[in-house]
Amino acid sequence: MKRRSVLNFIVSATCFFSVILIAAAMSISLLIIAQRIFEPFHVVVSNSMAPQISKGDAVMIKDIEPNNVKVGQVIVFRDPEQKDEMIIHRVVAVEPSGQAVLFTTKGDNNPVDDDWRVSTGEIVGAVGLHVPRFGSFVAFISTSRGYFSCVAIPGAVALALVFLLGIGETAEKRRPKLVRQMACPPRPKFDPKPTAGDS
């Protein structure tokens, strides 16, 4: 009885562990797909806004009205020198220039203001969600090594455990029947008809 209880516990724990592995692998797979298609998280690659926002953090961008940006607000804008890159800095000055508005920005961890001025058309948005250190994880799972470590291997391990449990349960169901057959062999059959020597 005790042996069966221990066996049931092991089976239950293995099933639970397999479900956790499969759920984690599926969640990370969905995150990878979403990141490649929609790129909801942006990885911070410098410490210019430390300690509020540090290298390796992840941020989500929310829409803002550029004309309503005020001094002290943290904005996300396209790098004037590399348009495919984005920068997160704080607005330190707002200067109307004809029909446009120019913003002077600065990283909290930088000693001086930025060399450029940002126009309203270059503003992408503001920081909507900040997740410390999550950017490093997002960057890792986006690589081949990260995919195999966090998705392929855990998924394969979970499937292997489920397969082994299936084999074990099948063997356990067949075992009592075999034991009964070995313990109680079939009785020999006798012919009830009398033989020639019987009186």
Image (spheres, grey):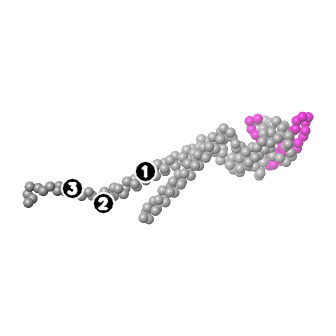
Q: Label 1 vs label 2: CA separation?
A: 25 Å
Q: Which residue is mark 2?
A: 183
Q: Which residue is mark 3?
A: 189
Magenta range is 83-111
Callout 3: few (<14), some (14-19), or many (20+) C-alpha neighbours within 10 Å?
A: few
Amino acid type at circle 2 is Ala
- For the C terminus, the quadrant is bottom left
Q: Position of residue 151 (x, y in %)?
A: 57, 45
Q: Position of residue 145 (x, y in %)?
A: 59, 43
Depicted 67 relative to depicted 184: above or below: above
Q: Nearer the viewer, residue 178 or 83?
A: 178
Amino acid type at circle 1 is Ile
Q: Label 2 vs label 3: CA separation?
A: 18 Å
Callout 2: few (<14), some (14-19), or many (20+) C-alpha neighbours within 10 Å?
A: few
Q: Nearer the viewer, residue 180 or 118?
A: 180
Q: Nearer the viewer, residue 58 or 67?
A: 67
Q: Secondary structure at mark 2?
A: helix
Q: Which residue is mark 1?
A: 167
